Structures are given as C-alpha cells and as structure tokens.
Image: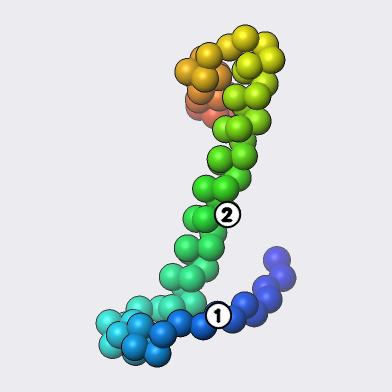
C-alpha cells in the first residue's frame, strides 16, 4: 500500500488544544477520512440496492434482509 501526504488547514487554537490533550492528529484525520469514505460507499450501495429492488419489486426491508443474510454467511 502506498501512502501519500495530505495537508489541511485548521485553526491554530484547535491544533494547540489537540496537542495539549495528546491527540494524534494524523491518526484522527485518517480515521475520519476512512469513516467518511465508508459511509459514502454504503450510501451508494444502498441506493443501488434500492434501485434493483424497485426494478424487481422487492421492498427495501427485503433487500436489507437478503444483504444481511449474505453478509452473515461469509
């Protein structure tokens, strides 16, 4: 896995408070970005599943059940 550097601007006071509290800013930012990407991917998957469900006349609940069962069987 290759890593790249991403920079962002934050208020100086915020960074100082984070340092005072011993917060690993890089770790927090990485985790936040990972969570946001995951949330967006799940949202897109939900939209795609709903579109498929509509085309084959399944309720969103039925689609969720099928997805859950498939996930649990892994």
Looking at the picture, the colour scheme in use is: rainbow
Q: Residue at x 57, y 54 (%)?
A: 37
Which quadrant, please, contains the C terminus?
top right
Q: Quadrant of residue 71?
A: top right
- The image position of residue 12, as x and y in percent, is 40, 90
Does 15 sit above or below residue 26?
below
- The image position of residue 25, as x and y in percent, is 43, 78
Q: Residue at x 67, y 11 (%)?
A: 56
Q: Is residue 11 left or right of residue 30?
A: left
Is residue 26 visible in the rendered structure shown here? yes
Does 56 sit above or below residue 69?
above
Q: Residue at x 60, y 24 (%)?
A: 50
Q: Quadrant of residue 42?
A: top right
Q: Which one is earlier in the sequence, the residue at label 2 or at label 1?
A: 1
Q: Is residue 23 left or right of residue 7?
A: left
Residue named by callout 1:
8
Q: CA distance from mark 2 to mark 1?
A: 17 Å
* Residue sitting at the far left: 21
Q: Residues within 10 Å of mark 1 (few under 14, many from 20)?
A: few
- The image position of residue 18, as x and y in percent, is 34, 82
- The image position of residue 51, as x and y in percent, is 65, 24
The dot on residue 37 is: 2
């Amino acid at each position: 896995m290759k890593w790249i550097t991403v920079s962002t601007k934050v208020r100086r006071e915020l960074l100082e408070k984070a340092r005072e509290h011993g917060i690993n800013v890089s770790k927090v930012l990485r985790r936040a970005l990972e969570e946001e990407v995951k949330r967006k991917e799940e949202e897109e998957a939900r939209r795609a599943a709903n579109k498929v469900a509509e085309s084959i006349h399944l309720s969103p609940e039925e689609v969720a059940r099928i997805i859950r069962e498939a996930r649990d069987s892994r």
